[in-house]
Image: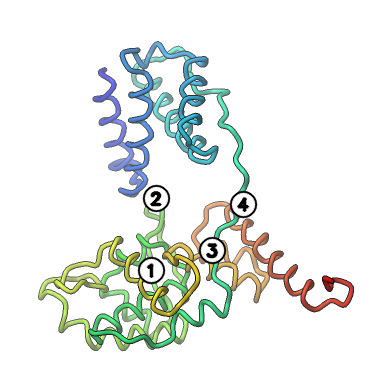
C-alpha cells in the first residue's frame, strides 16, 4: 500500500469507526505528514527504530517541543500498529522510542477577579451580538466546556439549561456528559434566546449564530473572546481554553473535590485533572506569602 493511500485509509477509519473529532483527525494528518516527509523515498514497512529516532531528533532540532514530539510519536505508533494489523509488519519501529522531555507547563487560568472583570458591561455597536457573546462567555466559565462542545450546541439545549440548570454536551470520542449551568449563565442564555431568532437563518438549529445567521465558527468565538478581554483591559491574551482552566481551578479551590471536577470536565483519567491541584497549590502559596507573618519578604 502506498504511504499516502495508507494514511488516508487510516484517517478515514479514525473518523468513521473510532469517531475521533475532526480536530483530532487533523492533528493525526499533520503528524503523519511529518513521517512521510522524513521517510522520503524509504518504504514505511522497512523503517527501523534507529531511523525513527533520527526523525525525532531532526524534528526536535527544528524546534518541536518534547510535548509536541510525544504527540507525534503517539500518532506514528498508532499508525504502525494499524499497518501491522493490515500488512503484517514484522515490528512497530516506534516501540521503545521516547521523545525529549519538556518542562511541565501548568495551564494558564485567570484569577477570580480577572474572570469577574471579563463579564463587566462593555460598549458594543450591536446589542444582539453583545448578548450572544455574554451568553457564550458565561457558559464557558460556568460549565467548563471545550470550544468544540460549546460551538456544537443546538437550540434544543436551551430548555434543560434554563429550566433544569444543566446541559448535555458531546465531548471527545463522542462521549456525552451533563454539566451544570450556573445562575448567571442561565440569565445570559435567556437574554440571548429572546434575541436569537432575529439573527438566525430560518432553518438554523445552532444555539449560537453569526451575523450572517449560520452556526458560529470556532475562530469567531476565539476572536470575540480575545477582543472582549482587550476592551476590558485584561493584561493577557484570553482564549476559550483559558476559561475552561479557570472554571476548573476556581471550582477546585472552593470545593477541593477533584473527582467532581474530573466528571464536569469530561476527563477520562483523574491524572488529566490532577494538574489543577498544582494551580490550587499556587493559590495557597500566594495566600501564605501575603498573610503569614513568617513569610513576609523584606
- Judged by depth in the image, the label closer to the viewer, 4 or 3, is 4
Question: Disc 3 vs disc 2: Cβ atoms closer than 8 Å?
Answer: no
Question: Disc 3 vs disc 1: Cβ atoms closer than 8 Å?
Answer: no
Residue under the image location 45 percent in, 62 percent down: 241
Image quadrant in which you'd find residue 177: bottom left
Dot 3: few (<14), some (14–19), or many (≥20) neighbours within 10 Å? some
Mark on residue 173?
2
**Farthest residue in the left direction?**
202
- Judged by depth in the image, the label closer to the viewer, 2 or 4, is 4
Residue under the image location 17 percent in, 82 percent down: 197
In the image, 37 versus 43, the foreground residue is 37
What residue would you read off at disc 3? 263
Dot 2: few (<14), some (14–19), or many (≥20) neighbours within 10 Å? few
Dot 2 falls on a residue whose secondary structure is: helix
Residue 161 lies, in percent from the top left, at 38, 80
Residue under the image location 59 percent in, 68 percent down: 249
What residue would you read off at disc 4? 271
Residue 14 lies, in percent from the top left, at 33, 39
Amino acid at each position: 500500500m502506498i504511504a499516502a493511500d495508507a494514511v488516508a485509509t487510516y484517517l478515514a477509519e479514525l473518523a468513521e469507526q473510532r469517531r475521533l473529532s475532526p480536530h483530532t483527525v487533523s492533528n493525526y494528518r499533520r503528524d503523519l505528514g511529518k513521517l512521510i516527509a522524513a521517510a522520503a523515498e524509504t518504504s514505511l514497512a522497512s523503517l527501523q527504530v534507529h531511523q525513527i529516532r533520527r526523525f525525532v531528533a531532526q524534528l526536535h532540532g527544528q524546534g518541536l517541543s518534547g510535548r509536541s514530539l510525544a504527540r507525534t510519536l503517539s500518532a506514528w505508533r498508532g499508525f504502525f500498529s494499524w499497518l501491522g494489523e493490515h500488512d503484517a509488519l514484522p515490528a512497530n519501529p516506534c516501540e521503545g522510542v521516547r521523545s525529549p522531555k519538556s518542562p511541565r507547563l501548568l495551564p494558564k487560568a485567570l484569577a477570580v477577579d480577572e474572570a469577574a472583570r471579563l463579564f463587566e458591561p462593555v460598549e458594543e455597536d450591536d446589542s444582539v451580538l453583545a448578548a450572544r457573546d455574554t451568553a457564550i462567555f458565561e457558559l464557558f466559565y460556568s460549565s467548563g466546556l471545550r470550544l468544540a462542545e460549546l460551538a456544537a450546541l443546538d437550540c434544543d439545549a436551551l430548555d434543560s439549561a434554563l429550566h433544569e440548570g444543566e446541559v448535555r454536551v458531546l465531548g471527545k470520542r463522542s462521549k456525552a456528559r451533563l454539566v451544570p449551568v450556573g445562575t448567571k449563565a442561565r440569565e445570559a442564555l435567556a437574554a440571548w434566546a429572546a434575541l436569537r431568532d432575529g439573527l438566525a437563518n430560518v432553518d438554523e438549529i445552532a444555539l449560537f449564530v453569526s451575523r450572517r445567521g449560520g452556526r458560529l465558527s470556532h475562530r469567531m468565538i476565539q476572536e470575540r473572546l480575545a477582543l472582549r478581554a482587550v476592551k476590558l483591559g485584561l493584561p493577557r491574551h484570553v482564549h476559550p481554553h483559558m476559561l475552561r482552566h479557570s472554571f476548573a481551578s476556581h471550582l477546585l479551590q472552593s470545593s477541593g473535590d477533584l473527582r467532581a471536577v474530573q466528571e464536569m470536565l469530561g476527563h477520562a483519567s483523574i491524572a488529566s485533572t490532577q494538574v489543577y491541584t498544582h494551580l490550587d497549590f499556587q493559590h495557597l502559596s500566594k495566600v501564605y506569602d501575603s498573610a503569614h507573618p513568617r513569610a513576609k519578604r523584606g
